[in-house]
Image: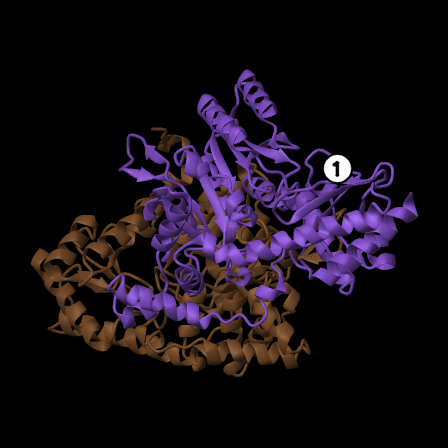
Chain colours: A brown, B purple
Amino acid sequence: VFSLRLEELHGSLADPVLGSIGFLNEIMSRYPNAIPFAPGAPNRTFVDGFNPMPYIERFVRYAATTRGMGEDAARRLLYEYGPSRGVINDIIATAWSRDHAADIAPDAVVVTVGAQEAMLLTLRALFGRSGDQLAVSNPCFPGIVGAARLLGVDIATVDDGPDGLDLDQLRGACQLARNEGLRVRACYVAPDFANPTGTRMSVAAREELLALAVEADLVLLEDNAYGFTAATSDELPPLAAMDQHRVAHISTFAKIGVAGARVGFVIAAQPVCGEQATASVLADHLAALKSMVTVNTSPLCQAVIGGMVLAHGTSLRELGAAKSKLYRENLRLVLEALDRHLARDGRPPQGVNWDRPEGGFFVRVYLPFAADAALLEESASRYGVLWTPMSTFYLDGGGTNVLRLSCSYLDAEQIDTGVARLAELVRSRL
Amino acid sequence: VFSLRLEELHGSLADPVLGSIGFLNEIMSRYPNAIPFAPGAPNRTFVDGFNPMPYIERFVRYAATTRGMGEDAARRLLYEYGPSRGVINDIIATAWSRDHAADIAPDAVVVTVGAQEAMLLTLRALFGRSGDQLAVSNPCFPGIVGAARLLGVDIATVDDGPDGLDLDQLRGACQLARNEGLRVRACYVAPDFANPTGTRMSVAAREELLALAVEADLVLLEDNAYGFTAATSDELPPLAAMDQHRVAHISTFAKIGVAGARVGFVIAAQPVCGEQATASVLADHLAALKSMVTVNTSPLCQAVIGGMVLAHGTSLRELGAAKSKLYRENLRLVLEALDRHLARDGRPPQGVNWDRPEGGFFVRVYLPFAADAALLEESASRYGVLWTPMSTFYLDGGGTNVLRLSCSYLDAEQIDTGVARLAELVRSRL
């Protein structure tokens, strides 16, 4: 029988990033009854009883009347092919502009199959010559690393410190690249409660990052997946609202809308100039590339999401409000449970500690021993609780003694029981 | 204001393939009232009045009962994240195996965002080292060329002759590559009524191609988008049914299901071996790569498609039967109208000719003058009829005097009027 040789397949398939995702999925499938602090999946409260039909109908009415298409043409939109750039771009542009007091043109938006496709398209467009590097935080969201590996984009790592991306290190990476005749072309950054660290950048740090981007001539790829988890009173402006030309803004409706629709978007308003170019912005080129990746995002799914945004005052903030509240409450419950179960006498055992993020899905727990595959296996089999080794998010072997808890999927009782089990595991090892 | 330079973006954005797609879309949007023989879009008969809900419910019942998940878990499947490889793989494997008297395992199937993502993933997995080439038919479907450009995969062209791919040329291309220390790693082929030529390969040619693939150690990427348009009595076996190990079979539900769902699939049963590999098939690796492209195909859309397949006796052939019939009838109408309007006295004018394909969406018309952008502009503005210059499908400047008619989108009256207008245009130039 004919067979292929693994070493002749593309190198990204041998990358540890893919391997670690496979391992985590595998262990979760083996322990379906363990309490999973592992995934960043949406809470079931928002999934059970979800009915997409009213939202689809809402979008059809909007297209039929506000756009003046008429009902038949509006309904046809859902089931035919559609433009690569999307069919709800105006809704997203209006909502985003309203939420952030910005002025985003619909033509600057490309609707994508989740944030992941937006990352792939943006990397592909920006990385056109050898010697260009993508700076990424370390530890990092595996999706951006995986997209870079798939496209053969070189990576430079910059530590994600307690206040987010280490800007001195980023400056250093740019300098180092220049010294070697290379260039940091773009930097991936999640300023709001990054996955996996949960860190958030202050406004001052955002301003400094934008100034550095101008100085070093970088494009910033802003991942905004968790920005919605901030309380409204505590929101910080997205980088793209501070400088829409330096920043390509990537987001997803998986968390604020519905994950099963697989709809995300990128705002890419950068003008593109050149001898042969007619007037265009980066979004035009992303749409052209998208025609070679997925052709277009399901218009049926876009209708579900478009209708959801319309039904929430054409505001992404309003759409995410109830979810934001539940996730903040879950985060509070996780921190409270850690205090209760792991710091019984008011402080944690020697060498044990954890972060206190103000938003996002993730809490890091620091241990005086390795939080590795062996510990996870024991945790799942003997204690019935699952989490993610932070080492899987590092590109250089860091994070060995740290684990990540994700608070999004569980209810209050599961959180309490799960943290109690984790505390048992930790104490058994001390 | 900051701007990007076109020449620093990825080279695929400057490729003529992307440019010609943009041009065709642009001219279609400028002449919305012209009769469009241009797109390969599904006929409106199958779009108007389409209701996805019964199919979604059908899939939920299947998952709840046949898979024993229970109703709540089955319904949750639609709205949560899901596995990268898909949630209707068993349905597709069963249907395909039944239709082609084959034995495809569900694990050999990856559900993708249309055939386009399947092409991208398969190319990415197979092309891991420099010096490897993808052989493609010339003229060629732009989607495979675009995916190759996006990934930096080198292309070797092989003429698509009157009986499909020219196998002597393919043999020659393999030999030429070997002489230069290179290798033809894979060959893209659409044996059934290829886009854009409409050619079909005989069973003997298929057997010869498979033998050549073994001899030259190629993987064949079989694009089956138009196979369903054959009459049942006139069907030929897909390459993958003749040798599932040499062939990665790519197909789409855009034509037999509903285009707006954006669901396609790839069957990739090739065993993958290597020192570090646990037992796997190529589909496992495609699913891993997919997690870096789109994460997963919308399970809501998969449910629509899964339900449609179940509702048609778990058979892709039955699902496509009514559509197959309508498209064959449309093709007959196009050929009849060409006879009537362009060959009034029993034969066409000097230098004018056309193909007589037995299936598919496309008919080539050969002219004694250039079928170029200028002629298309005149055709649209003065005669109200749109078609596609065949030159846009060539990688080396061929096809200048040939245009392509697509029969899928129009009704009988539009076909007759459109061909009459085309005949007027042609006579005006003779």
Residue B305, quarter of the rendered image? bottom left
Q: Quadrant of the C terminus of chain A?
A: bottom left
Image height check: is B132 above or below A247? above
Residue B261 seen by the camera: yes
Tell me: B57 left or right of A350.
Answer: right
What chain is tagged by disc 1?
B
Q: Whole-percent x and y of residue A181?
A: 57, 37
As drawn, the residue found furthest toward the top would be B179
Q: Residue at x 47, y 36 (%)?
A: B239
Q: Whole-percent x and y of residue B343?
A: 83, 45
Q: Whole-percent x and y of residue A44?
A: 31, 73
Q: Quadrant of the N terminus of chain A?
A: top left
As drawn, the residue found furthest toward the left would be A428
User: Identity of the amino acid at label 1?
Assistant: Gly
Tell me: B360 left or right of B290.
Answer: right
Residue A226 seen by the camera: no
Query: Badge 1 local density, few (<14 within 10 Å), some, or many (20+)?
Result: many
Q: How many marks can you see? A: 1
Q: Residue at x 44, y 70 (%)?
A: A227
Q: Which residue is mark 1?
A: B399
Tell me: B377 left or right of A252.
Answer: right
Most foreground residue, A272 or A413? A413
Most foreground residue, B247 or B274? B247
Q: Whole-percent x and y of residue B37?
A: 72, 54
SS of the residue at dot 1? loop
Residue B60, quarter of the rendered image? bottom left
Image height check: is B124 above or below A82? above
Most foreground residue, B66 or A9? B66
